[in-house]
Amino acid sequence: MKRKFLVWFLPLIVCFLQRCIGFTSRFKEIGKAHYDLLVAKNSPLILSIWHTNVLYSPYLHRGKNVGVLISESKDGDFINQVVLRFGNTSIRGSSSKGGSKALKAVIVHLKKGLSAAFTPDGPRGPALIVQPGLIAAAQVTQAPIVPFHYECTRQWILEKAWDKHRVPKPFTTFVVSYGDPIYIPREMNEVEFENQRKLVEEAMLANRERAISEAQRLSS
């Protein structure tokens, strides 16, 4: 009974705090035109997000009905409620236990014509390294990968966390950056698959650096 109450109550607090910080903040968007065009066409896409950006990504895409892969653990129950309260969809499954099952769930979601969010270095890292699941999902569904990253002018960085997680402070400026869509070929051999994986990783790192540079410029 106590746990059921916490699963209901704690997400309310988290969502309230995120909305409060969002209300006091400014937002600068970079490279969002391609993303907006895909959304306007109702084209399914894969938002590719480094794990360091997990905290505020559902808030920044609230009401977009993006499918978010969430583990089937007890912690996942809390995250699930946050995702749902921001108007998105949860895809339950673990990429560390039965990863193929989780990947299949994402693929089924995309084939329904719905967009999904992917953390290609989650849930345990290594940080900033794209794992093959993202490429496989894009290959099978032909949904484009759109790199996404946010950086804040005022934020805490959890240095001891494996992903150096970002926690925005009140009265910050969010620099929200989108990379160009990346379309993965349907037919590839192993070498070509690895080349595509590296290409996506480089694009995500470049998008991350663009957001960091702009946040630093605005802070100076």
Image (tube, rainbow, N blue to C red):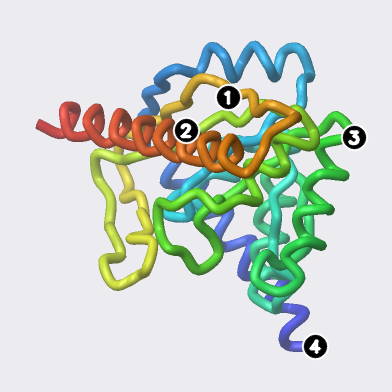
Q: Which image quadrant: the C terminus?
A: top left
Farthest-out residue, left: 220
Cα–Cα span, label 2 and label 4: 48 Å
Cα–Cα span, label 3 and label 4: 36 Å
- Tell me what residue is drawn at x 22 percent, y 31 percent: 213
What residue is pinned by disc 2? Answer: 199
Q: Are the residues at dot 1 and dot 4 in contact (C-beta closer than 8 Å)? A: no
Answer with mark 3 or mark 1, whichever residue precedes in sequence: 3
Q: Secondary structure at mark 2?
A: helix
Q: Are the residues at dot 2 and dot 1 in contact (C-beta closer than 8 Å)? A: yes
Question: Could you tell me the amino acid type at mark 4?
Answer: Met
Q: Secondary structure at mark 4?
A: loop
Q: Is residue 23 at all visible to an observer of this figure?
A: no
Q: Which image quadrant: the N terminus?
A: bottom right
What residue is pinned by disc 1? Answer: 182
Q: Would residue 199 be found to the left or right of residue 11 on screen?
A: left
Q: Is residue 112 at all visible to an observer of this figure?
A: yes
Measured from the top left, where is residue 170 in percent x and y? 33, 47
Q: Quadrant of residue 8?
A: bottom right
Question: Could you tell me the amino acid type at mark 3?
Answer: Lys
Answer with mark 2 or mark 4, whichever residue precedes in sequence: 4
